């Protein structure tokens, strides 16, 4: 028996045109120990409409890692990737078939290779405002660059949290070392109904203040809620018990030592469904 998980990873189109969220979305966040889990790669937006999620075009050169972090350590999942058919824009789509051990709490995490984006000035400025890239916007403003095109190297990070059995392990509330990462500081599966979910946003291993974090229900109901991290890089969000939630954040900085582009940007997400 397979249980389906969806991973939306917008990697192959310019960043401002691809400001869609990307995420890992298991159909069951509480699989049985040893049960095989089918993971599909998706790209798009939460809900329905013109930008609704589609199968993501799978390219091996885009994949840095697909790993499962559990209470007993880390296991590489790249060998589980399968090409399954036609996806977005006719590109080959992919999936992964993996076995989740147990008991305990697990973090499935994806990292992409970088892609390049070059946008004319007004479009780049609108993109910076839309996704909350305040550090890049301030850099351009201070140097009188708002009237010139913007180039960036951007990449993706995605995590989802799975629970096997009744043992809630601490590793779910610890960073795994992604460049940009959303970390729950409490295990979401240990939370009671109506409790607040504390999230920490980290950039290069340090708390990130002033980042724009968006929260939305993966079933497409409700509005997208926006938060800004405090001086400690933290936000506290009402837990949606029983509802799968997507949390996403984007951050970027100048890249003075990279001859390919002016800026470095990372898109990151976390999905979880508290019990």
Image (tube, rainbow, N blue to C red):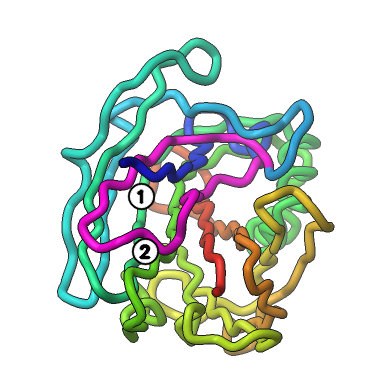
Question: Which residues, given as a range, are shown in magenta?
Answer: 20-45
Q: Residue at x 62, y 46 (%)?
A: 21
Circles 1, 2 touching at the beta carbon (< 8 Å): yes
Instruction: Pick the quarter of the image with the C terminus.
Output: bottom right
Q: Residue at x 41, y 22 (%)?
A: 93
Of residues 78 and 16, which is closer to you in this image?
Answer: 78
Secondary structure beneath label 2: loop
Of residues 245 and 209, which is closer to you in this image?
Answer: 245
Q: Residue furthest front?
A: 1
Q: Is residue 77 left or right of residue 41?
A: left
Of residues 107 and 89, which is closer to you in this image?
Answer: 107
The answer to whether residue 143 of the structure is visible from this angle is: no
Label 1 to label 2, Cα distance in Å? 8 Å
Report if residue 37 lies within the magenta region: yes
The residue to which callout 2 is attached is: 178
Report if residue 143 lies within the magenta region: no
The residue to which callout 1 is attached is: 111
């Amino acid at each position: 028996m397979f249980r389906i998980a969806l991973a939306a990873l917008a990697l192959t189109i310019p960043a401002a045109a691809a400001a869609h969220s990307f995420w890992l979305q298991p159909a069951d966040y509480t699989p049985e120990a040893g049960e095989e889990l089918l993971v599909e790669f998706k790209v798009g937006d939460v809900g329905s409409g013109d930008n609704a999620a589609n199968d993501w075009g799978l390219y091996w050169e885009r994949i840095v890692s697909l790993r499962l972090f559990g209470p007993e350590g880390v296991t590489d999942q790249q060998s589980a990737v399968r090409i399954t058919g036609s996806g977005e824009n006719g590109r080959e789509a992919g999936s992964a078939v993996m076995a989740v051990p147990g008991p305990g709490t697990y973090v499935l995490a994806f990292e992409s290779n970088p892609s390049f984006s070059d946008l004319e000035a007004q479009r780049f400025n609108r993109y910076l405002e839309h996704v909350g890239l305040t550090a890049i916007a301030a850099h351009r403003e201070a140097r009188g660059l708002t009237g010139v095109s913007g180039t960036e190297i951007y990449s993706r990070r995605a995590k989802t949290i799975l629970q096997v059995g009744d043992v809630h392990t601490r590793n779910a509330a610890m960073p795994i070392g992604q460049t940009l990462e959303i970390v729950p500081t409490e295990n979401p599966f240990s939370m009671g109904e109506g409790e607040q979910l504390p999230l920490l946003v980290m950039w290069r291993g340090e708390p990130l203040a002033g980042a724009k974090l968006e929260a939305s229900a993966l079933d497409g109901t409700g509005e997208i809620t926006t938060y800004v991290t405090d001086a400690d890089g933290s936000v506290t969000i009402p837990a949606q018990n029983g509802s799968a939630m997507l949390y996403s954040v984007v951050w970027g900085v100048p890249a003075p030592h990279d001859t390919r582009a002016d800026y470095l940007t990372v898109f990151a997400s976390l999905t979880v469904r508290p019990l």
